[in-house]
């Protein structure tokens, strides 16, 4: 039954302005439980309609009335928005790479491939842009959350006047969900204390299954369902998040369609692959390794990819392959020992990419199995920025060595060679592989001025709406164009007000005009786009690109002093209509054009909160920002507490501190973790030893794990039943980042052990680990001596646990000079190798 406008007016909808004169779609009897309506969407959530029934003293004389259920416009599709992580433009086979990506191929064959689509050059900025349709500085994410500073463009807080696509679609009747990486919750809001308005469930996504932060182990991730930490990997050594996430998404979609078959879903699916750690299953490592895709090295790989790109039409015939940089070694110049390690690194990366695409393929197949493929808009973006060179020149078995400015020599890396990619490593490949994966462009992740940092292969399919199947589109577009594209496909407008807050305009443009074959070569509707990251800049305008020349190298994380952010950069100029790879710099020939584009950049920068420009990197990591721990020097706990992120925990980095544990030991003794932060790849733990066969159990132990390279252990005698006080007192040798010091273990007032360490962790413990009291929730800090299996719950009673922190001893000049130049401690070969063999069932489903 159709509902007339007079009936709607009687129900209060017209008077409230919720129904446009022509667009309203209503079904069912007015006031009946089954009635539905679309809304104009100007105000979200829509105002409550006036009661349209009749109320008398008696129910028998009254008429009930139900507000119609809000639904999307007729024909609104399901939306599956997929984006992988740190995949360079030339990595997937769909865009010329050597790694097979059949799921991406499938979407491209059923729709279109976009070869001129761009990100922001870094993770959380791209992710903030893709869920809001605004530039990353506009939504407070001018840089990754770990480097946030107190300016509107950089505070990592998405403003309430810039509502997300999740909010818009949810309030228009969609079921909304988010799977995988959440790098948009500010680190200072990521604890159990909230607030939760900047978590996915607070940003319009009704269901969240994923991890919080820049990266996570795929074997033991910091995993959440909504806002609750979960640990499905415990006692399940074959578990891997890449597969588990697909399983959860498939079950979620199945459940939705069985319960509410007519309700469209919006699934935002963003796996951790291929960001470090590269964690595929052993089966995938063998499969890709046997293909020998990388045995000829990075220079030959680049030539192969570029030839593939021309053959596939990804690059036009006139495109030129940009030169190999002098800062990176040629493959033929390195030793056979180095080549063997680097091939292993690339094989594991390739396996991770193929594994990630395979699991995405399972999700896509599930959509088809549900009978929904023809009614689903699928957008599959390969990478949120260019390939990552953050493994430094030689790669690393532990990415957190990079973030702490420590380079791991090739010889030391061989200790982990047999186990590369397993849960015993947190690996990243050598920087030259990243440059090759960004073929045919220059530069890599972190660099927004050149397409090697921003170009992302993208495929879009929507049966019946794209009539050029397998076609290629070269129009310039950007991640801010995704939201308006989805809204146009769904027939939903941008709201004017969300939760009472007037909304700022969406800044992207829809890409739907490119879907018609007749518009294959239509001019782009995205004519101007600025780029900025870490002080490096670019500006695209009408087919021209002006770019600063990067000064600092992404694989060194700017350990050298940065130049003046305004005057210290040379500008380059490219006609990207004729030169799509930015091969031919025209700046010297056309200085006035450079000035014209620089002026446009300045205008855009002022408009979108890009100022103030800042080209520091690692020094920003520990910059002051809102914190539940700010100003506190004493922390007290008791009993159990787990899953606390570093931002809400006492930080022992670069300072003196005392940890005091008052415990009660039951008859028969006790064991277990008293307090820990970090895990296998760096951190500390104070615990009572487990022992072996009943021997050496119940001994108080403090263990300091320096980046899985060196462990220092303090231990005391076994504790008998009763109350005891265990103290670990550490005096830093500071000032300066990563200074060592002397630690003393004291039990019941008596010193039982004293040792010194040469180096401490300078910048960060692993960000996917947490602070735990009374147990260890993910990986253990011990390796051989005093090894235990998490959760290793404390079997005594923690009456009181106290941290007393001294002020950080700072010497900025010394710290800056040391950071990035510190050699890696010599790994203990026994520690590094003996326990590394994975369990026999690792990776098996």
Image: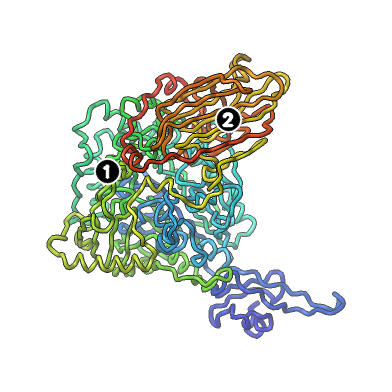
Q: Name the mark on residue 672.
A: none
x and y percent of residue 710 in the render? 42, 25
Q: Is residue 191 left or right of residue 508?
A: right
Which image quadrant is residue 167 in?
A: bottom right
- The coloring applied to the image is rainbow
Q: Nearer the viewer, residue 128 or 799?
A: 799
Query: In the displayed structure, does residue 566 sit left or right of residue 245?
Result: left
The crowd level at tag 2 (other Cα within 10 Å; few <14, some 14-19, many 20+) is some
Residue identified by numbered label 2: 790
Relative to 712, 472 lies left or right: left
Residue nearest the viewer, comparing 360 with 811: 811
Q: Quadrant of residue 622?
A: top left
CB atoms of marks 2 and 1 within 8 Å: no
Instruction: State whether residue 134 is above or below residue 22.
Output: above
Relative side of 56 to 638, left or right:
right
Q: Residue at x 60, y 63 (%)?
A: 262
Q: Is residue 614 visible?
A: yes
Assign a secondary structure to mark 1.
helix
Q: Is residue 387 above or below residue 126?
A: above
Give coordinates of residue 396: x percent, y percent. 36, 33
Residue 780 visible in image: no
Tell me which numbered mark, 2 or 1, is placed earlier along the sequence: 1
x, y (%) of residue 475?
30, 64
- Label 2 SS: loop
């Amino acid at each position: 039954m159709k509902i007339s406008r007079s009936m709607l007016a009687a129900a209060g909808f017209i008077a409230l302005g919720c129904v446009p004169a022509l667009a309203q779609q209503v079904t069912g009897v007015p006031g009946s439980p089954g009635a539905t309506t679309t809304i104009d969407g100007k105000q979200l959530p829509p105002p409550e309609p006036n009661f349209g029934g009749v109320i008398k003293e008696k129910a028998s004389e009254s008429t009930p009335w139900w507000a119609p259920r809000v639904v999307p416009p007729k024909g609104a599709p399901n939306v599956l928005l997929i984006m992988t992580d740190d995949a360079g433009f030339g990595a997937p086979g769909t865009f010329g790479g050597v790694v097979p990506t059949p799921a991406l191929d499938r979407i491209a064959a059923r729709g279109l491939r976009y070869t001129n689509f761009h990100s922001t050059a870094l993770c959380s900025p791209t992710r903030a842009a893709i869920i809001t349709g605004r530039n990353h500085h506009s939504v407070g994410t001018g840089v990754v959350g770990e480097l946030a500073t107190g300016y509107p463009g950089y505070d990592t807080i998405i403003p309430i006047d810039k509502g997300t696509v999740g909010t818009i679609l949810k309030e228009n009747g969609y079921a909304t969900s988010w799977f995988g990486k959440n790098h948009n919750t500010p680190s200072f809001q990521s604890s159990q204390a909230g607030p939760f308005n900047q978590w996915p469930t607070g940003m319009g996504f009704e269901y969240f299954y994923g991890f919080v932060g820049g990266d996570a182990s795929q074997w033991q991730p910091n995993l959440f369902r909504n806002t609750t930490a979960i640990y499905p990997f415990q006692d399940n050594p074959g578990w891997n998040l890449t597969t588990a996430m697909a399983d959860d998404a498939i079950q979620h979609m199945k459940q939705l369609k069985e319960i509410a078959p007519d309700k469209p879903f919006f699934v935002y699916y963003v796996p951790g692959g291929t960001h470090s750690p590269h964690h595929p299953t052993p089966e995938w490592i063998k499969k890709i390794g046997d293909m020998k895709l990388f045995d000829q090295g990075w220079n030959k790989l680049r030539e192969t990819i570029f030839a593939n790109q021309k053959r596939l039409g990804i690059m036009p015939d006139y495109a030129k392959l940009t030169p190999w940089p002098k800062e990176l070694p040629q493959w033929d110049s390195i030793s056979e020992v180095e080549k063997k390690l680097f091939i292993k690194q690339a094989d594991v990366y390739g396996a991770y990419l193929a594994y990630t695409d395979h699991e995405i393929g399972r999700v896509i197949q599930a959509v088809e199995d549900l009978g929904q493929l023809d009614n689903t808009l699928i957008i599959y973006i390969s990478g949120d920025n260019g390939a990552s060179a953050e493994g430094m020149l030689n790669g690393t078995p532990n990415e957190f060595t990079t973030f702490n400015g420590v380079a791991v020599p090739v010889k030391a890396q061989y200790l982990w060679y047999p186990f590369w990619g397993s849960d015993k490593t947190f690996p990243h490949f050598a920087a030259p592989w990243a440059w090759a994966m960004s073929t045919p462009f220059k530069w890599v992740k972190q660099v927004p001025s050149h397409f090697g940092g921003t170009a992302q292969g993208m495929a879009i399919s929507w049966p019946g709406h794209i009539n050029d199947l397998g076609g290629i589109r070269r129009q310039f577009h950007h991640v801010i164009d995704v939201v308006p594209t989805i809204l146009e496909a769904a027939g939903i407008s941008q709201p004017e007000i969300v939760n009472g807050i007037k909304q700022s305009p969406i800044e992207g443009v829809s890409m739907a005009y490119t879907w018609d074959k007749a518009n294959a070569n239509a001019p782009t509707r995205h004519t101007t786009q600025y780029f900025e990251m870490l002080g490096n800049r670019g500006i695209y305008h009408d087919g021209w690109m002006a770019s600063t020349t990067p000064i600092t190298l992404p694989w060194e994380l700017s350990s050298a002093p940065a130049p003046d952010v305004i005057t210290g950069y040379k500008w380059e100029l490219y006609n990207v209509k004729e030169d799509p790879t930015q091969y031919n710099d025209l700046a010297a020939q056309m200085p006035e054009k450079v000035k014209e584009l620089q002026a446009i950049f300045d205008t855009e920068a002022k408009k979108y909160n890009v100022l103030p420009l800042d080209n520091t990197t690692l020094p920003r990591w520990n910059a002051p920002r809102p914190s539940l721990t700010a100003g506190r020097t004493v922390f007290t706990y008791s009993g159990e507490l787990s899953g606390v992120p570093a931002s809400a925990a006492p930080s022992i980095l670069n300072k003196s501190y005392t940890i005091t544990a008052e415990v009660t030991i039951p008859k028969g003794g006790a064991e277990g973790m008293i307090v820990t932060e970090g895990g296998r790849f760096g951190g500390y733990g104070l615990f009572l030893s487990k022992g072996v066969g009943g021997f050496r159990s119940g001994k108080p132990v403090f263990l300091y794990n320096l980046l899985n390279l060196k462990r220092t252990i303090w231990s005391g005698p076994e504790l008998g039943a009763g109350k005891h006080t265990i103290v670990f007192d550490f005096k830093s040798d500071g000032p300066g980042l990563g200074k060592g010091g002397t630690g003393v273990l004291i039990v019941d007032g008596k010193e039982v052990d004293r040792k010194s360490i040469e180096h401490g962790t300078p910048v960060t413990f692993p960000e996917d680990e947490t602070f735990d009291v009374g147990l260890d929730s993910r990986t253990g800090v011990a390796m051989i001596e005093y090894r235990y299996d998490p959760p290793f719950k404390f079997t005594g009673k923690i009456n009181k646990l106290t941290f007393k922190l001294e002020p950080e001893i700072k010497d900025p000049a010394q710290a800056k000079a040391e950071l990035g130049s510190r050699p890696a401690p010599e790994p203990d070969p026994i520690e590094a190798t003996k326990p590394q063999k994975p369990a026999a069932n690792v990776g098996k489903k």
